[in-house]
Image (spheres, coloured by chain):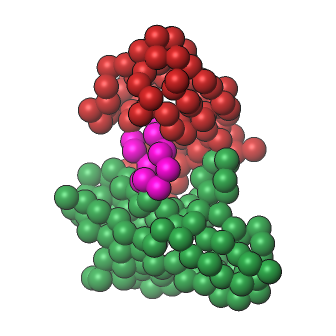
Chain colours: A red, B green
Amino acid sequence: ETGVTQTPRHLVMGMTNKKSLKCEQHLGHNAMYWYKQSAKKPLELMFVYSLEERVENNSVPSRFSPECPNSSHLFLHLHTLQPEDSALYLCASSQDQGLSGETEAFFGQGTRLTVV
Amino acid sequence: GQNIDQPTEMTATEGAIVQINCTYQTSGFNGLFWYQQHAGEAPTFLSYNVLDGLEEKGRFSSFLSRSKGYSYLLLKELQMKDSASYLCAVRDGNYQLIWGAGTKLIIKP
């Protein structure tokens, strides 16, 4: 139990479907992140929220739409995805955006997404 | 561009010692992290270095040389449960985390 919970753990969706990934953190952190992890590639930061405001969007296609209704919850809405979007999507949280010291990120177990 | 390099895969024997290297080229430096990730699970924090030298935590130690852009993670008395991927990440001058692709460590009996 890492304090960060993601659902679902596995998702298979067609290219015309709409689905959402959910992340919840119970650590009292004020920053939350979405990462994409593909096989043998570095973690790719997708979105950063600090105090419920989006502070970074790393040129992510508009078919990925984040939502942060409060500091404990983060969603990633998916629509019209492509097969190359198949990957492990990881949510993380930290006490702040890492502006000081040993502020490590706590990760959820991820959603394994397959786009068919 | 910014870059983190670490070996793709390493194999070691149970009970032995293994060193996983990480070299980095980043715009600025504000700390280096090591994470462990078991297959199908979340990455978990192992260590943090911001000053040169060795940080020891039980069987795991992490070393940093800022002048060389180099770090290593040292795992002693290897156990089968240490089979996992080890991720190196550097916080750059803008406090953004730059990640390596990870090193898959295979432990053999």
Of the pair B46 and A61, the residue shown nearer to us: A61
> Would residue B91 be counted in the magenta stretch?
no
Tell me: residue B35, above or below residue B20. Answer: above
Of the pair A44 and A17, the residue shown nearer to us: A17
On the rendered structure, is B57 left or right of B77?
Answer: left
Q: Quadrant of the N terminus of chain A?
A: top right
Of the pair A100 and B29, the residue shown nearer to us: B29
Residue shown at 76%/86% (left/top)?
B15
Q: Answer with the quarter of the image where residue B53 lies.
A: bottom left
Whether residue A38 can be seen here? yes
Residue shown at 65%/87% (left/top)?
B17
The image shows residue A74 at horizontal and vertical percentages of 53, 25
The image shows residue A66 at horizontal and vertical percentages of 43, 21
In the image, farthest residue toward the front: A116
On the rendered structure, is A87 left or right of A24?
Answer: left
> Would residue A40 be counted in the magenta stretch?
yes
Tell me: residue A108, above or below residue A103. Answer: above
Q: Answer with the quarter of the image where residue B45 lies.
A: bottom right
In the image, farthest residue toward the bottom: B16
Tell me: residue B36, above or below residue B64. Answer: above
Residue shown at 19%/58% (left/top)?
B1
Whether residue A93 can be seen here? no
The image shows residue B31 at horizontal and vertical percentages of 39, 65
Magenta span = A33-45
